[in-house]
Image (cartoon, rainbow, N blue to C red):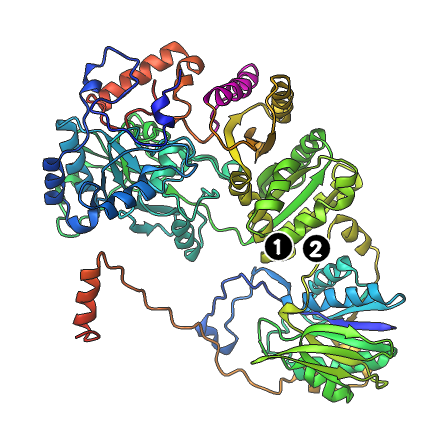
Amino acid sequence: MRKILVPIKRVIDYAQKIRVDPSKGAQGVQLKNVKMSMNPFCEIAVEEAIQLKEQNKGAEVVAISVGPKQCTETIRTALAMGADRGIHIETKPDVRGDYIDLQPWAIATLLKGVVEKEDAVDLVLLGKQSIDSDCGQTGPLLAGLLNAPQATFAANIERGDDGSFTVERETDTGTETIKLNASGKPAVITCDLRLNTPRYPTMPNIMKAKKKPVETISLEDMVKELGLDLDEVLTPKHEVVEVYEPPPRKEGETVGSIDELLGKLKERGLVA
Amino acid sequence: MFSLTSRLRFGIRYAIVPSRRNASDHSKNKLRGPLAQDVSYFRSVLARPGHSVLDGTATQDVKDEIDNRYNADWTKNYQGSSDLVLRPQSTSEVSSILKYCNENYIGITPQGGNTGLCGGATPISNEVILSMEYMNRIYKLDDYSGVLTCDAGCILQSLHDYAEEKGYLFPLDIGSKGTCQIGGNVSTNAGGHHFFRFGGLHGTVVGMEVVLADGRVLRMNVDVSDDDNNDDCTHRFQQSSASLRKDNTGYDLKQLFIGGEGTLGIVTKVAVACPALPTSKNVALLVCNSYSDVLQILKTSKEELGEILSAIELIDSNTMKFVQKYGSGIGDHLISELLSPEVEAADKQPLFILVESQGCDQESDSSKMDAFLTSLYESSTIENGFLAQDSKHIEEIWGIRESCNPSVARAGYVHKFDVSIGIEAYMEVAEEVSDALENANLSDLTVCVWGHVADGNAHINIVSGQCDKDAVREETIENIVYSSVMKRKGSISAEHGIGQSKRKYMSQIKDGAVLELMSQMKNLFDPHFIMNPGKYLP
């Protein structure tokens, strides 16, 4: 096995309470001083890549992220988990990755360019979706653009000696197992929750990660290098019309006794 | 000698409260349990009697509920035999109850979340249990001073949630926060994980409302009414302040109730000063080989993390192994990674240190933490470590720390100790105790240590494989631990309080004049000795 490319995304930490300022219109998600971390599904993708690397000597895991300068920290986490090197496509600080500015089409277009430039990429592992936009489109779009075989919502991945991938994937009614034959194109697989439990990057690995190479290149330069159109990439294909907080749940009422409960139910005509 | 009555599995009804040592207080011997006419009285003065009066003599169901929920403590070491639980909904109800009980010499055991570890909220006989669980309103949080005012029955977690909504952090954080109530926390002067950063309740509680034994209500820098129907405003002109940060006008009486364990009065409302919610939190779990490395971490953390350092906790390997075996599963993978087979094979006894930082600048805090961990690792002060990358990791690391107590409880019968020692000597006590236990031929005991190391507070838990409670064995172990602590001029109760379990030591550990004053204080506030009999003072 040669190269495994793992695109990772830096998103608002899953436990953060999202605050929306409607006066700022559709852009009104409060991002200042909010805790960010690696998208949980991307973490699972990195873990899977490392496991495959451990099973296939000589494989190289490349972590790639598109975002502001703080993305290097996210890439360092991937390196500490065992990735070999990182690529950081740096965007200007005001470019938003949560579907307002950068959208899956742009990311998939960039990734296609990187896959072709890197050459020898056998597998692209992505998280099934990011927890900020919940689109789930980047993986499938990339497969489409590359004309590559894909499997989404992977719960288990097995690599065959012939370079094929057998993927058990989650469906609404259970699981489905499909085989991606070796095709000369990288297999594109998106990872779901049950695939693995990401390892903990402990100190010795964090120290090693500091020495691993991370190539930083600005979005503008990368676009130029790949022969793409910057406007094409930066102009979102979809417009976010509105972002709002869900209406607060109505508070329930505590009653003191069964009689009281009956009384209330009768009051509301729910019980005769 | 300790009172055997407190250790009996079956509650016994006493007409007289037992084990008095202070013979000069004859009034104490006049205490009685509630009778039918008392129950009728309580039903008549409480607004929702069907709700607020649990009469154990009425049906077996009620008796069972009282026994399961109120008569036993969390550790199951103490069992009361109360037949009556009162659950008032306002300060005026509490006042009516106490006034009546005081006039009729009926003993009262105040109870909050019933999570205490010294039997302080468990009746020693058939006292009336006064539960604060229905007094759980949060009144307000001042947007500028951060002072939060609430009822004493508020569950600690709800205060955290409320304050967080408004951008504030409730300054007290302990493992039982899902169940414990702030009134109980205040009455036991609970310490918790962030004592190091925010100080204790003696500092953060700025106001309090208390009901005394005779029914009088003391309002000290708290001025909210919970009685929507009967909003008597006259008192407001007498009382001068509410929820102020500073007020130096007289003796600070509320300090007596903080840590007073319900023996001087019942706390009904509190006002607590909350710091602003930090927006950046970092947590790391470190592994070191010896306590001298831990001491180095303590020093380095103060230098390199400085004002953002918010907590340092220690967990020894015996404890960590119990967490691995009996914990709820949280942090399992992390523990396996850090307590790896190589560590086991090398017969190492690593010490685990949790370090937390809280600040308001993500980037700067993260880089401080990173530099801190790197310097510890490069100087071999730590053997290994893990810095949380996201909230899930933070929850896991704290989950491990908060699992210590319940995991150890599942491992066997636990002899629980909570001691304060000089930080340098922190592990010495555990080592000395281990040796002494071996020399005393006491077998099948595992000494576990965890706790707030930066406060010098060690939770020493000795786990016994034997489930029977042998009073002699228990006393021997107690003597071994306490003599080790006391010879180092430590405290036998750092934060858990006295309750029933440490009462017998009071005369040994307190200066005579101090004890005398405390006794006089008790006589002044509670001359009929109805407030939480059998606890605290000898």
Does any portion of residue B312 appear in the rendered image? yes
Mark 1, residues whose alpha carbon is within 10 Å: few (<14), some, or many (≥20)?
Answer: many
Secondary structure under the numbered disc 2 in the rendered image: loop
* B125 is higher (above) or lower (below) than B398: above
Residue at 62% across, 75% down: A129
- On the image, the x and y values in percent for residue A136 come to 62, 79
Numbered badge on residue A200: 2
Say which element carries label 1: helix
Give amino acid for label 1. Answer: His
- Residue hosting label 1: B393
Image mark 1: chain: B
B210 relative to A251, above or below = above
Query: What is the crowding at mark 2: few (fewer than 14 residues within 10 Å), some, or many (at least 20)?
Result: many
Q: In which quarter of the image is the C terminus of chain A?
A: bottom left
**The magenta segment:** B471-494
Whether residue B301 is situated above or below residue A45 in the rendered picture: above
Q: What residue appears at the point 58 percent right and 59 percent down from the top-left corner?
A: A35
Read off the chain for label 2: A
Decide which of B143, B496 is in the foreground and name it.
Answer: B496
Please tell me which residue lies in front, A169 or B166: A169
Say if mark 2 contacts mark 1, CB within 8 Å. yes
Label 2 to label 1: alpha-carbon separation? 9 Å
Q: In this view, does B337 lie to the left or right of B223?
A: right
Of residues B300 and A124, the one drawn nearer to the viewer in this rendering: A124
User: Would residue B244 be visible to someone looking at this image?
Assistant: no
The quarter of the picture where residue B536 lies is top left
Could you tell me what secondary structure mostly forms the magenta stretch? helix
Q: Is residue B348 left or right of residue B230?
A: right
- Please provide percent x and percent y for residue B332: 63, 51
| Identity, as a three-letter code, of the amino acid under mark 2 | Tyr
**Where is residue B499 drawn, in percent x and y?**
37, 28
A225 is within the stretch colored magenta: no
